[in-house]
Image: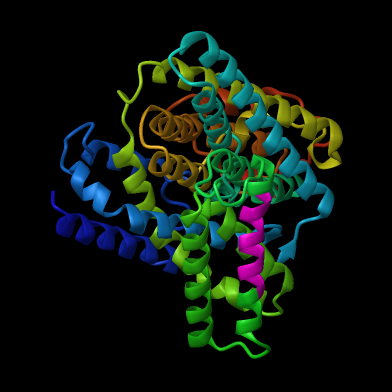
């Protein structure tokens, strides 16, 4: 498939994404992680059917970089907010901390495993591999709770807690990515800085250009002018950070956070750019799937297996911490941690950015780990989350049993006695209404 046909396919997919956003299809359809588009890209890509040729994919690398940067800016604009409600600082700090701890645990496991099982890797490459796999393993997609809420009318304190945590933990993987890219900047000859200094520089690029955007947006919100300001400053942020070998995603995320924190027009800006998220995500996920290569490195299978095991352990630990520290999660199902396994566009964006920045075994192993986490989380996460919310009495709609193991989890949640913090099922739930 040549570049023209690939472009046409991506435009069609983008149009379908805009239709999904505009509500012309049923709410709650599709998968919260978007893993189906990753799988579709893999099937069409060079590693499977070969309909997407490597030369065509290479032609779209600059477009993919811009798309990933724009997505990171949109995530930054929404960071710390669920809708127009600001997340409490304590929950924000807890979400970021648990995300970093999960990513750090995965990174440590991968580093030790690579030190023993992949002696051919240079020490610097081993650190990059560990940091990258840890970064793509840290996220819980903010769309997981939204998906359950839309499909099963979930509402309550536990749903709000998980939504707040999932919305705030995007900082963890993007910060780890910023640090990993800062290990190998391209401007070391002019400005010798340690990696943490380059990480700060990455954030400062986004903050400075975010302040420029706020000034240019002015006191009066004008739609056409605002589009020009956001597109121009985001492209400048992406180009500046990429030019010196730093992370464009972390820089544009910092830019989005700065605009949201300072601009008086945050709600109008979010309403303006939010509909662009899905149309950009779907083609980006398809391209990410096309780049996935199971034969990229001999150590790839067991590195990914270790990363998945460490991610499960980290999320189970996260669920335990929530049950101990948060009154809204006390007495909930012990499967709460498994309900946090869904990863999505942020993790896949980080994985694709690693594959583009570090082509070869390291980058492609990171991308494969992101895809494996998304697919595995899709099988486990929504089912466990649904069962957990059902036990807490927060599902107003009748629960549909899963083809995987959701039936067993649902039966366990049904048979388990309600805990101290459980809310009794609503009358609508008992009648099967909602």
Depth check, front residue: 180 or 368: 180
Depth check, front residue: 135 or 223: 135
The picture places residue 294, in percent across and down from the top left corner, at 32, 25
Secondary structure mostly taken by the magenta-highlighted segment of the chain: helix
Residue at 63% in and 76% down: 212
Residue at 46% in and 22% down: 304
| Residue 346 appearing in the image | yes
For residue 146: magenta?
no
Residue at the front extreme, as displayed: 189
The picture places residue 8, in percent across and down from the top left corner, at 20, 61
| Left or right of residue 37: residue 336 | right
Q: Give the range drawn in magenta.
A: 199-211
Residue at the top extreme, as displayed: 116
Depth check, front residue: 188 or 84: 188
Q: How many labels does the image show?
A: 0
The picture places residue 189, in percent across and down from the top left corner, at 54, 47
Say above or below: 319 vs 27: above
Say above or below: 141 vs 205: above
The image's colouring method is rainbow
The picture places residue 211, in percent across and down from the top left corner, at 67, 73
Say above or below: 6 vs 53: below
For residue 205: magenta?
yes
| Residue 70 appearing in the image | no
């Amino acid at each position: 498939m040549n570049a023209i046909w690939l472009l046409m396919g991506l435009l069609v997919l983008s149009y379908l994404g805009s239709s999904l956003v505009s509500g012309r299809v049923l709410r709650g359809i599709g998968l919260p992680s978007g893993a189906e588009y990753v799988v579709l890209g893999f099937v069409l890509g060079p590693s499977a059917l070969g309909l997407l040729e490597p030369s065509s994919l290479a032609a779209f690398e600059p477009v993919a970089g811009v798309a990933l940067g724009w997505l990171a800016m949109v995530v930054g604009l929404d960071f710390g907010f669920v809708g127009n409600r600001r997340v409490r600082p304590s929950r924000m700090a807890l979400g970021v901390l648990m995300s970093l701890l999960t990513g750090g645990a995965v990174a440590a496991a991968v580093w030790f495993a690579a030190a023993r099982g992949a002696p051919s890797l240079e020490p610097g490459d081993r650190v990059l591999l560990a940091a990258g796999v840890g970064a793509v393993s840290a996220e819980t997609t903010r769309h997981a709770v939204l998906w359950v809420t839309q499909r099963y009318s979930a509402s309550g304190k536990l749903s709000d807690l998980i939504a707040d945590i999932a919305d705030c933990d995007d900082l963890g993987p993007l910060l780890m990515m910023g640090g990993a890219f800062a290990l190998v900047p391209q401007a070391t000859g002019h400005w010798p800085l340690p990696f943490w200094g380059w990480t700060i520089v990455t954030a400062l690029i986004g903050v400075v250009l975010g302040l420029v955007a706020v000034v240019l947006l002015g006191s009066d919100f004008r739609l056409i002018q605002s589009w020009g300001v956001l597109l121009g400053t985001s492209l400048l942020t992406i180009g500046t950070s990429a030019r010196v070998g730093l992370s464009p995603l972390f820089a544009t995320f910092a830019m989005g956070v700065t605009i949201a924190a300072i601009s008086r027009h945050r709600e109008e800006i979010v309403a303006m750019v939010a509909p662009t998220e899905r149309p950009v995500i779907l083609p980006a996920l398809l391209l990410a799937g096309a780049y996935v290569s199971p034969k990229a490195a001999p150590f790839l299978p067991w590195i990914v297996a270790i990363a998945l095991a460490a991610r499960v352990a980290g999320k189970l630990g996260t669920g335990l911490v929530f049950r101990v520290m948060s009154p809204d999660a006390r007495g909930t199902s012990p499967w709460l941690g498994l309900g946090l396994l869904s990863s999505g566009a942020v993790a896949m964006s980080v994985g694709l950015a690693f594959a583009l920045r570090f082509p070869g075994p390291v980058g492609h192993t990171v991308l494969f780990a992101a895809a494996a986490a998304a697919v595995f989380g899709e099988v486990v996460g929504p089912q466990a989350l649904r069962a957990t919310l059902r036990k807490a009495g927060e599902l107003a709609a009748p629960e549909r049993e899963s083809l995987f193991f959701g039936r067993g989890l649902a039966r366990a949640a049904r048979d388990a006695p309600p805990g101290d913090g459980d809310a009794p099922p609503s009358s609508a739930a008992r009648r099967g209404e909602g």
